[in-house]
Amino acid sequence: MKCYTRNTRLMGCHFELGILSPDATKANKLLQDGIDEIRRIENLLTEFVPNSITGKLNSLAHKNKIPIPQEVFDLLVRCDRISRLTRGYFDITVGPLKRIYQFRNKEFKMPQKGLIQRTLKSVGYQKIQLNSKTLEVKFENEGMHISFAAIGKGYAADSVKKLWQSMGVASGYINASGDLTAFGWNEKQEPWMIGIGNPESPQQALLNIPLINMAVATSGDYEQHFIYNNKRYSHNLNPFTGLPVASVKSISVFSPSAELSDALATALSAMELKLALSFVNQLPNTHVIIIDANNQVHFSKQLEYEVMA
């Protein structure tokens, strides 16, 4: 069996797809099917195209109830469940907060407290009204803006995995800029492996973790961070305070679902360390590795890993 791969850029990140197959023609067809599925989901969920489902919700849902496809409605329901599970630390409505931060500027300026407080009035997953009978969505407040950025890549990876398995694929992976979903075994008939990078030197792996029908998503500030008043912050925002998240350099979440791992990585980054570890330890088949601001590594319970020399 040979591993056939394909690379593409979709949903704002680099995807690498891999399939184990004895047949090159069949493998390349399946890889293209996977890319097509990711592109379909991107077109459905993107917030940057006015006539996408998300675009229509963001421009119209504060005025009227907007009917949406079952697929997107179901995703919104799952987002709501994860928000409730994390007690609001996962929140797809933080878009208005992101708009008041100029993260791309070389010199960061913290928004005024009054602006942050006013903007927080447009934030809150509880303000999304979902009607399961009519598949309609309504926003309670004007100025609300949702984004699937913290869960979309995971949903796409799960969708490709489901598609491939329905077509008889026994082994493969979907790598979305380092977030890895894997099933089956690699060419050596061993588990697929993921390396956890050193936040100070991302090309260096601190740990190797075997993935057996698991997905891992990482939220870290090693590629995007800024210094303000001698303190290091990431671009992730706390949905309660409206402030950028500090004190955590990297969080990697392992679970059977790429969608869940993706969402939890964002949620846990806003939690205090003890709360994040306690929260994950209560979830079945879910694990986390947290690297704090002092480069100390913290593990949830019962996680198998190999320390790299």
Image: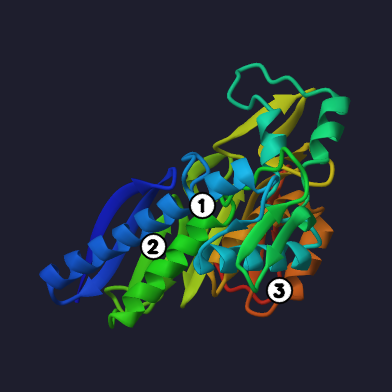
For marks 2 and 3, the one nearer the N-term is: 2
Quadrant for the N terminus in the image: bottom left
Residue 33 % position (x, y)? 27, 65
**Looking at this view, is 134 or 209 the one in front?**
134
| Residue 192 shows up from this direction | no
Q: Which mark is residue 205?
A: none
Residue 178 position within the rendered picture, expressed as x and y whole percent measured from the top left: 46, 53
Q: Quadrant of residue 125?
A: bottom right
Q: Is residue 225 above or below residue 172?
A: above
Please tell me the numbered disc located at residue 53: 1
- Mark 3 lies on a secondary structure that is loop
Residue of label 2:
174
What residue sits 69% from the left and 45% below the top? 63
For label 3, the residue is 301
Question: At label 1, which amino acid type do we have?
Answer: Ile
- Residue 182 in view of the camera: yes
- For the residues labelled 3 and 1, the Cα–Cα distance comes to 39 Å
Q: Residue at x 38, y 67 (%)?
A: 160
Left or right: 73 in relation to 51: right
Q: Under tag 2, what secondary structure?
A: strand
Q: Residue furthest front?
A: 64
Mark 2: amino acid: Ile
Residue 124 versus residue 241: which sits nearer the camera? 124
Classify mark 1: residues with Cα within 10 Å, few (<14), some (14-19) or many (20+).
Answer: some
Which comes sooner in the sequence, label 3 or label 1? 1
Q: Amino acid at mark 3?
A: Lys
